[in-house]
Amino acid sequence: MIEELGITTEVGALVAENTHHYDEFSLTLVLLKAVIISGSISPTVHDHIEWVHFGSLLDWDLAPADIPLAEEVVNLYSGDATG
């Protein structure tokens, strides 16, 4: 996280995992809960970072491998008023 976002995190529980098969390669993504313990979020390798409400997460143009993980986030937090 420090390399991509400039933050140090404490990693928590596994939320979801997805293996996606593209034509040229396969990719496994692992989604973990995490808490920021130091630093401020700053794009270091990305052009833009934006916080979005989980309810609109699936409205974004996500990579195919990301969609199942985004769906899991929406399902997990759809009843949580603080999300």
Image (cartoon, rainbow, N blue to C red):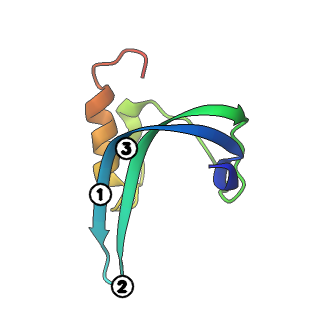
**Going 65% across and 31% down the picture, which residue do you hit?**
37
* Type of amino acid at the residue the image marks with label 1: Asn
Q: Depth check: give the residue in front, 63 or 2.
A: 2
Point out which mark residue 59 bears.
3
5 above or below 34?
below
Q: CA distance from mark 3 to mark 1?
A: 19 Å
Distance of label 1 from label 2 (alpha carbons): 17 Å
23 displayed left or right of 10: left
Read off the residue under disc 2.
24
Side (left or right) of 40 relative to 53: right
Helix, strand or loop under label 2: loop
Image-quadrant location for residue 26: bottom left
Relative to residue 53, is residue 46 drawn left or right?
right
In the image as oriented, which residue stretches furthest toward the bottom?
Answer: 24
For this view, does 60 lie left or right of residue 64?
A: right
Category of crowding for the residue at label 1, using alpha-carbon neighbours closer than 10 angstroms: few (below 14), some (14–19), many (at least 20): some
Task: Please tell me whether mark 1 or mark 2 is closer to you in this view.
Answer: 1
Question: In terms of depth relative to the viewer, which is nearer, 81 or 12?
Answer: 12
N-terminal-most mark, 1 or 2: 1
Query: Secondary structure beneath disc 3?
Result: helix
State which quarter of the image contains the C terminus. top left
Residue 60, position as x, y percentages in the image: 42, 47
Name the kind of residue labelled 2 in the image: Glu
**Mark 2 neighbour density, 10 Å: few (under 14) some (14–19) many (20 or more):** few
Label 3 Cα neighbours within 10 Å, binned few <14 / some 14-19 / many ≥20:
few
Of 65 and 7, nearer the camera is 7
What residue is shown with label 1? Answer: 18
Q: Secondary structure at mark 1?
A: strand
